[in-house]
Image (tube, rainbow, N blue to C red):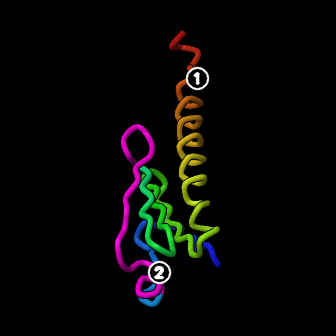
Amino acid sequence: MGVFRFENKYAGPTKTQRKRYMTGRSEEHFFGEGNEITVISYFDAAFLKDDIDGIRILFTGFHDKQKAFDEANRLVAYHRQKEENKKSFVRGKDL
C-alpha cells in the first residue's frame, strides 16, 4: 500500500496512521550488533527504527510489510561497511 519515510528521529507517523496501521498485537525484531535497528511488526504494517541515523520508516500493506525485514538487513550491512571504511583510513603520521 505505501512506504512512509521519516528522516528525523523525532518525526513519526501521524495520529491517523498510528490508529489505522499500528494497533493490536505487535512483535519486535532487533538487528545489528547493538540492536540499533528495530522492526516492530503489526498485523497490517511494519515500523522500522534505525537509531544510528535516526531514520524511521512505516511500511503499510502485506507486500510492503515484508520489505521491512529486507530493509533492516540492508541497513545492517550498510552500517557495517561504513564502520569498516572508517577503520581503513590511517593518517601518514600514524604509520
Say left or right for 23 vs 85: left
Position in image of residue 8 (x %, y %): 48, 68
Position in image of residue 9 (x %, y %): 43, 66
- Three-letter code, disc 1: Ser
Q: Secondary structure beneath disc 1?
A: helix
* Front-lying residue, 5 or 46: 46
Position in image of residue 38 (x %, y %): 42, 55
Q: Which residues are magenta?
A: 17-35
Task: Residue at the far bottom: name it.
Answer: 16
Residue with the mark numbered 1: 88
* Front-lying residue, 87 or 22: 22
Q: Are marks 2 and 1 in contact (CB under 8 Å)?
A: no
Marks 2/1: CA distance?
43 Å
* Front-lying residue, 49 or 55: 49
The residue shown at (44%, 51%) is: 37
Position in image of residue 47 (x %, y %): 47, 67
Residue with the mark numbered 2: 21
- Three-letter code, disc 2: Tyr
